[in-house]
Image (cartoon, rainbow, N blue to C red):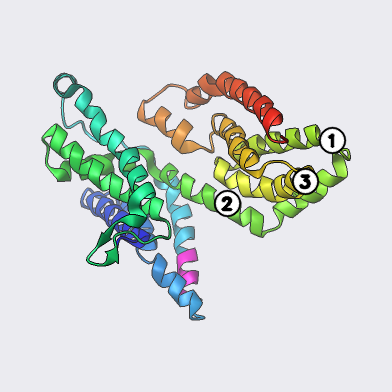
Amino acid sequence: MLRIEYAYWLIAAFLLYTAWRNAREREMSRAAFWAVLGLLFAGGDAVLAAQKAGNTLPAQLAGSAVIVLALLAPRLRRRAHPETASASDRLASALRLGHKLFVPALLIPLVTLLVALFGAHLVLGGHALFAKPQMTLTGLALACVVALTAAARVARAPLHQGLSEGRRLLDAIGWAALLPLLLAALGEVFTQSGVGAAIASLAETILPEGNAFMCLLVFSLGMVLFTVIMGNAFAAFPVMMAGIGLPLLVQRYGANPAVLGSMGMLCGYCGTLLTPMAADYNLVPAALLELRNPYGVIRAQAWSAFAIFVATFITMWLLVFR
């Protein structure tokens, strides 16, 4: 049975491989950073099991490892690896492969979707092939492995070359590769610390009684603002839903929760286009493309974000209270 833990172990193996390669090249800060992160991925199950058994020491060690990562992160500056092929060779390869280059990329969403839709019905030897908890994430991990294998076949290159290229990109991105993980966890931290309840109390004090339009506007703008602050609409969503969405819009004004949730997330995505905190979307591409202005991607997206937000809010207002 394929479980999400296998994906974490696979990621841990790749991070430890990256650490090993950096250690061989005397890049000790990078090696230590990726090694610590790899051990955290590998030992997550052990930490949870120890906590359930009442042993807090592994969790304290994991917290100390996170502090070590924060101390090492400033030492990870962008590193340019030597090119393995000339520009003319890369162009000739791209022309030779043509549209076949899209096959590995398209396999990732395709395999993930197939697992999400049909994974529960796949049985091997009387046992389910995929564990039901987090089946979609397990399918995504499997899709990445399939795509890597397909890329090696399409490019007629050894499989380990794909690992080397993955390591090169990871070194180029550096500590910013962790931002999606940290920002997604931040939303749960905010919710558990009572930020949603504080927003609900503030909204009830400020917003005029019986004005559903203003309440919806504050919710939508709040999704944008919290996404800008935290860099991730998934982190902003639980805060705004706990503070305004559920207690006011759904329970008081009868808003459709499905419409509110889906279109509220789209409002949050507009904030993703505007913030450097969404480093994987806005800063990493600028670094990989070596743009002169690290915020050039954000500047190019600003007007699109504004137009999408206006269109989304108007559509949500027309549909959410029907």
> Could you say where residue 210 lies in the image, as x and y percent from the top left?
87, 39
- Counting residues from the start of the chain, the first of labels 3 and 1 encountered is 1
The reply, left or right, for residue 62 in relation to residue 303 is left
Q: Depth check: 222 or 18 in front?
A: 222
Look at the image and give the residue range highlighted in magenta.
Answer: 57-63
Residue 4: within the magenta?
no
Q: Which residue is mark 1?
A: 211
- Residue 16 location (% of width, % of height): 28, 56
Question: Relative to residue 164, is residue 77 drawn left or right?
Answer: right
Amino acid carrying mark 1 in the image: Asn
Of helix, strand and loop, which one carries label 1?
A: loop
Q: Which residue position holds label 3?
A: 248
Q: Which residue is mark 2?
A: 186
- SS of the residue at dot 2? helix
Tell me the residue at 38%/43% (across/down).
174
Q: Earlier in the sequence, mark 2 or mark 3?
A: 2
Quadrant housing the N terminus = bottom left
Q: Residue at x 14, y 37 (%)?
A: 153
Compare residues 158 and 204 and report the one nearer the observer: 204
